[in-house]
Amino acid sequence: MGLMSVNICSTDDLATQTALLDALAALGARPEDDSPLDVPLPTGLSGFRVGFETLTVFVDAWCVDLEGPDELVRRVLAELNRAG
C-alpha cells in the first residue's frame, strides 16, 4: 500500500476546506491532537486518524494538500465529489 498526495484546493477556497472537513468527518476521521479544526485550516500539518491509519492535511500560503494511504485518500476524494 502506497501513499498518495493530492492538491485539494487553494488556501483561499474556504468552501472546499469546509467540504474537506465534512468529508473527513463522514469517514470518521478525528484530529490526532483531539482539537477541533475550523476554516480556514491552520497553516502547517494537521494529522487525522481513521482507525489505525493517518491522513495528513498540509496548508501553506498557496494550497491545501492531503496525503495518506491510497485507498483512504480515494475515499476522501469520493466524499468530496459527492458533496460537490
Image (cartoon, rainbow, N blue to C red):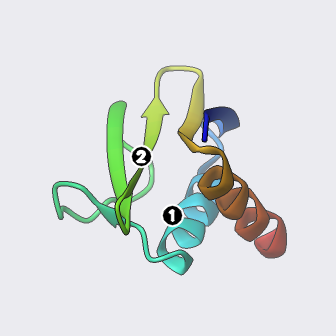
Q: Is residue 11 visible?
A: no
Toward the viewer: 56 or 16?
56
Residue 24 higher or lower than 74, as above or below: below
Kindly check if marks 2 and 1 are in contact, taking CB atoms under 8 A apart as contact. yes
| Kind of residue at badge 1 | Leu
Residue 37 higher or lower than 29, as above or below: above
Q: Position of residue 25 (x, y in %)?
A: 48, 74
Which residue, given by chain and number where applicable, does mark 1 sit on? 21
Secondary structure under tag 2 reads loop
Q: Crowding near pointer 1: few (<14 within 10 Å), some, many (20+)?
A: some
Residue 41: assigned label: 2
Q: Residue at x 72, y 70 (%)?
A: 79
Of labels 2 and 1, the one closer to you: 1
Q: Residue at x 56, y 40 (%)?
A: 66
| Kind of residue at badge 2 | Leu
Secondary structure under tag 1 reads helix
